[in-house]
Image (spheres, rainbow, N blue to C red):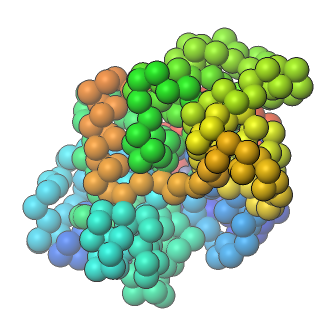
Amino acid sequence: MTSVKAYAAHQADKPLEPFQLTRREPGVDDVEIKILYCGVCHSDIHTARNEWGGTMYPVVPGHEIVGKVSRVGANVSKFKVGDTVGVGCFVDSCGHCSNCKDHQEQYCENGNSQTYNSFEQDKKTITYGGYSTHIVVTQGFVLNISDKLPLEKVAPLLCAGITTYSPLKYWGVKKGDKLAVVGLGGLGHMAVKLAASMGADVTMLSRSPEKAKDAGELGAHHFALTTEKETMKGLANTFDFIIDTVSAEHDYNQYLALLRTNGVMILLGVPPTPSEVQAVQLIFGRRSLVGSLVGGIKETQEMLDYCAEHGITSDVEMIKIDQINEAYERTLTGDVRYRFVIDMASI
Ligand code: NAP
Ligand code: ZN
């Protein structure tokens, strides 16, 4: 057992604070990683504040992890000490259900082990995330990271990148498709970059007029303010796809109306409260409302390789670990351009 420094939330309404946690000694199949950078996902905030229920305190969030291998177990062949590696939203799964066999560990039928606020596959050891100096992960859930790109800008790809890449691939978004992204935050800015790189005609739908210029620089071809009724009316029946990344409750019907016949609206954001959907919005136009959860390990590696090849990274604002509570507050007001990343050397 190794004692490592971390930051944890101890209660929903209390700030995160320094915390000491114990990591297991690397087993034969394990990789121990010295964490260099960890992105700050809105899911970290939902969990730290128990907005979805089920938070097990103390919780150490963080699932956008990039670091260097510091130790490996005897059976580890894929990695050696010093390699640059990543860890995303889950660290293990059953390995034998049909989804695991199909490289879709995110949908493991027996429950995967999420990187934090979850259980290892023994179903009793609680997992702790990347707001810490080290993590120990079984080799099959560790990703190769190219040294070509700045590592702090790669960290957010491990969640925001794969969560937006996976649905684009699954629904076959291609050149010329008209695609809208709702919400310009961590996921939203990666959705814009990735969809534009695949040739889609991208419209940014945002409630924040001050983000219009950035949206264009990120690759969006058009920008529309969701608060302007007439603009939204003018966009009715326009899009083949809508990717919704909004973290708080909002009206889905307003966006469904913007889909063309057979259009697909993909929910990525997980507001803590449910929303009503009007059947007519789906029926008229045979529209689909669907969701998507991160992506499997194989697809995450594919995404990382794709981003390395195309020079795609996240736009980040670096913080020290003791700025984490301020970063949460700023994320909640939409004041982040476009992902906070913790420099773990500051712990
Ligand atoms: P984020 O950086 O905070 O971005 C969310 C964006 O949504 C904001 O920048 C804002 O964009 C918009 N927004 C926020 N509150 C709003 C409100 N009340 N009304 C309208 N728009 C609002 O969050 P994130 O890290 O991208 O995560 C977004 C959501 O995805 C979270 O719920 C997170 O838990 C979830 N998530 C899901 C998955 C998955 O696998 N499906 C993976 C990771 C995260 P504008 O200022 O442009 O309007
Ligand atoms: Zn995330």
Q: How many marks?
A: 0
- Left or right of 24? Residue 171 is right
Q: Quadrant of residue 22?
A: bottom left
Q: Quadrant of residue 169?
A: top left
Residue 230 in view here: yes
Image coordinates of residue 247 in percent, x first then y, are: 72, 48
Image coordinates of residue 80 in percent, x first then y, are: 14, 54
Image coordinates of residue 263 in percent, x first then y, are: 60, 40
Residue at coordinates 53% horizontally, 34% vertically from top-left?
191
Q: Nearer the viewer, residue 334 or 199?
A: 199
> From what the image shows, is residue 343 above or below residue 68?
above
> From what the image shows, is residue 132 above or below residue 1?
above
Q: Quadrant of the N terminus?
A: bottom left
Q: Nearer the viewer, residue 238 or 345?
A: 238
Residue 136 in view here: no
Residue at coordinates 64% horizontally, 76% vertically from top-left?
56
Q: Nearer the viewer, residue 277 or 160?
A: 277
Q: Nearer the viewer, residue 282 or 175?
A: 282
Image coordinates of residue 141 in percent, x first then y, are: 31, 62
Q: Quadrant of residue 55?
A: bottom right
> From what the image shows, is residue 326 above or below residue 215?
below
- Left or right of 8? Residue 52 is right
> From what the image shows, is residue 309 above or below residue 75?
above
Residue at coordinates 42% horizontally, 54% vertically from top-left?
295
Q: As drawn, which residue projects farthest toward the right?
A: 229
Residue at coordinates 57% horizontally, 19% vertically from top-left?
220
- Left or right of 34? Residue 123 is right
